[in-house]
């Protein structure tokens, strides 16, 4: 609204989404859960995935293998970074999730430590 030059005059209604379940709601829905658990778990996992995707971005960069221990301190990831060798060089490609709010600062730190080709991608969903 602010971007369009509009302002709120009155709040008509406030709402929120709530996932409600009972102790007898363990009903399986083969079309929605593919037999891998109950519907409540499926929906909860999907919601958590979207929330994580809004909080994190995917950061990819290249770095000499010798500098990998230093840059991993900057980008430890949620569990650990994905490291792949680059063809014909003693370099590796690193892919890692970082918090969206700190992405610019992390990019600066990586560049200062010798990383190159630093790219940031939006994440749509995550599990």
Image (cartoon, rainbow, N blue to C red):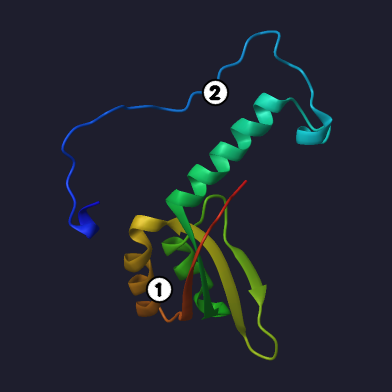
The CA span between labels 1 and 2 is 41 Å
Where residue 87 appears, as percent x and y from the top left, is 70, 87
Mark 2 lies on residue? 19
The quadrant where residue 12 appears? top left
Residue 83 percent across, percent down from the top left = 62, 68
At a point 82% along the width and 36% down the height, the residue shown is: 34
In the visual, does 97 lie left or right of 41?
A: left
Q: Is residue 61 above or below residue 123?
A: below
Residue 48 numbered tag: none
Residue at image position (18%, 41%) is 8
User: In this rendering, is residue 87 above or below 40?
Assistant: below
Foreground residue, 74 or 95? 95
Label 1 crowd (10 A; few <14 / some 14-19 / many >=20): many
Q: Secondary structure at mark 2?
A: loop
Numbered disc total: 2
Point out residue 25 in the picture as x, y percentages from the top left corner. Answer: 70, 14
Q: Residue at x 49, y 23 (%)?
A: 18
The residue that disc 1 covers is 110
Q: Position of residue 118 (x, y in %)?
A: 46, 77
Viewer-nearest of discs 1 and 2: 2
């Amino acid at each position: 609204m602010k971007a369009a030059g509009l302002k709120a005059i009155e709040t008509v209604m406030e709402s929120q989404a709530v996932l409600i379940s009972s102790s007898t709601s363990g009903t399986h829905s083969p079309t929605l859960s593919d037999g891998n658990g109950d519907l409540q778990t499926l929906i909860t996992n999907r919601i958590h995935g979207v929330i994580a995707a809004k909080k994190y971005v995917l950061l990819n960069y290249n770095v000499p293998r010798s500098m990998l221990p230093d840059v991993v301190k900057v980008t430890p990831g949620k569990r650990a970074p994905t490291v792949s060798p680059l063809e014909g060089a003693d370099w590796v490609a690193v892919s890692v999730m970082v918090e969206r709010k700190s992405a610019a600062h992390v990019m600066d730190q990586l560049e200062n430590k010798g990383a190159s080709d630093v790219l940031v991608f939006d994440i749509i969903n995550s599990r």
